Image: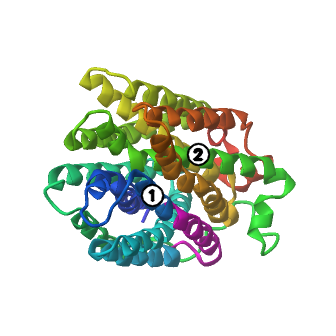
């Protein structure tokens, strides 16, 4: 298999795996209105926020463990374990008969979800064609948004006529990808150009040494704000639209537009990133998220609201994709999984906070627009954090050919 063919195969496989993650990321938002009306479970808005936070609470465990295991044992085995784990717990969500059991399955599912992004991002980055690394990694990361689109389409077709449990049955599809992963994904991590190897067994210590510390902490903080937006929107956007007078079908259309915007916006942004404008694209995306949420809170013609929802998708999910790309560029191969795992693991606190934060705002403030304005604060904070990133480490740039070019830098 040639390098170009291998890069395309890796991108396609990464896209498929993250499509599965995106489906489960947005499924709680799609079924949220149905959960609120489910007889016998007594689900409130606060409960919905708690369910979203429980899913996110398992993700740091998966992110950190998978990133570390991927650097130590290669990407293949952790990927296979994560896909099998996801299938089991999604199936159990589909048959959960009580709210307590359903909540437990969401927490366990979150562990598997947290594992996939660092593993896939590292794998596609290492398999990519150097001149198209941003585009190929960005394309794979749009799988999250494609999964969200599928969730919205299925939710619009089946809800509220079908029981919401039925949407979780589609979670068994990860099993289909396991033999493909075993065939395509290398068993070991590639060596860095120049022979850079681990200096100690403590990989967390390595990403926090003086030359990496500032960038590492900024990645963690930027990921936190990005995931507040992603998981807050994923859990609450359809419900907020219903609260503002739209029916369930309309709110799911906005969710589909949100994810379509994330796909198209990410692809557009990575084209700029391949020209050395990753930092500018990330800052702009955070700002666009704030503007889009303000627009969604106001009465506008339907096409304008759909467009604003699409821009919000770029500003939330698309922005987090850009941060993940920057992390993958920054660290050498033997630290890439660990860097991604801890960035997403620590940043996943934002995923835990996001749904509960939005839930608390909607409970404390009766104003229908409050939920939308609650997104503005993390969006502007994220823009400020991205603007503070000054560039990649010189030593890290020398580690691989991809980092030796200006395209690998934030500007």
- Front-lying residue, 302 or 98: 98
Q: Secondary structure at mark 2?
A: helix
On residue 178, the disc is none
Colouring: rainbow
Q: Secondary structure at mark 1?
A: helix
Badge count: 2
List the residue tagged with mark 2: 323
- Quadrant in the rendering for residue 313: top left
- Disc 1 crowd, CA 10 A, few/some/many (<14, 14-19, 20+): many
The magenta segment: 56-75
- Quadrant in the rendering for residue 51: bottom left
**Residue 59 covered by magenta stretch:** yes
Q: Are marks 2 and 1 in contact (CB under 8 Å)?
A: no
Q: Quadrant of the C terminus?
A: top right
Q: Position of residue 83 (x, y in %)?
A: 41, 73
Q: Is residue 353 left or right of residue 136?
A: right
List the residue tagged with mark 1: 52
Q: Earlier in the sequence, mark 2 or mark 1?
A: 1
Residue at 52% x, 40% y: name it. Answer: 319
Q: Position of residue 357 (x, y in %)?
A: 53, 47
Farthest right residue? 210
Answer above or below: position of 223 versus 67.
above
The secondary structure making up most of the magenta span is helix
Answer above or below: position of 239 versus 315.
below
- Front-lying residue, 83 or 408: 83
Q: Position of residue 36 (x, y in %)?
A: 30, 55
């Amino acid at each position: 298999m040639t390098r170009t063919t291998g890069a395309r195969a890796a991108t396609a496989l990464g896209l498929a795996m993250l499509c599965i993650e995106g489906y489960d990321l947005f499924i709680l938002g799609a079924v949220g209105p149905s959960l609120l009306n489910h007889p016998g479970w007594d689900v409130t808005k606060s409960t919905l926020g708690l369910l979203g936070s429980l899913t996110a609470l398992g993700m740091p465990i998966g992110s950190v463990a998978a990133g570390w295991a991927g650097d130590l044992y290669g990407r293949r085995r952790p990927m296979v374990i994560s896909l099998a784990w996801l299938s089991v717990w999604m199936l159990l969500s589909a048959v959960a008969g009580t709210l307590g059991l359903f909540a437990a399955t969401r927490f366990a599912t979150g562990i598997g979800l947290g594992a996939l992004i660092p593993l896939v991002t590292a794998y596609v980055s290492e398999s990519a064609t150097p001149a198209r690394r941003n585009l190929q990694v960005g394309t794979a990361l749009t799988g999250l948004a494609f999964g969200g689109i599928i969730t919205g389409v299925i939710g619009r077709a089946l809800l509220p006529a079908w029981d919401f449990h039925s949407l979780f049955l589609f979670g068994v599809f990860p099993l289909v990808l396991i033999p493909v992963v075993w065939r395509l994904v290398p068993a070991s991590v590639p060596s860095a150009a120049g022979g850079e190897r681990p200096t100690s067994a403590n990989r967390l210590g390595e990403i926090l040494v003086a030359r990496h510390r500032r960038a590492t902490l900024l990645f963690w903080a930027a990921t936190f704000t990005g995931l507040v937006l992603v998981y807050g929107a994923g859990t609450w956007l359809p419900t907020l639209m219903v609260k503002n007078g739209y029916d369930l079908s309309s709110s799911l259309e906005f969710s589909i537009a949100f994810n379509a915007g994330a796909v198209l916006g990410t692809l557009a942004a990575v084209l700029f990133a391949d020209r050395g404008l990753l930092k500018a694209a990330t800052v702009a995306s955070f700002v666009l998220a704030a503007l889009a949420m303000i627009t969604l809170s106001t009465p506008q013609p339907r096409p304008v609201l759909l467009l604003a929802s699409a821009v919000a998708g770029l500003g939330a999910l698309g922005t987090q994709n850009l941060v993940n790309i920057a992390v993958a560029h920054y660290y050498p191969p033997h630290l890439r999984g660990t860097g991604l795992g801890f960035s997403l693991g620590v940043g996943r606190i934002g995923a835990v906070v996001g749904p509960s934060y939005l839930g608390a705002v909607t409970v404390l403030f009766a104003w229908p627009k409050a939920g939308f304005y609650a997104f503005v604060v993390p969006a502007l904070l994220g823009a400020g954090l991205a603007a503070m990133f000054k560039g990649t480490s010189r030593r890290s740039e020398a580690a691989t050919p991809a980092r030796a070019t200006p395209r690998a830098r934030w500007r």
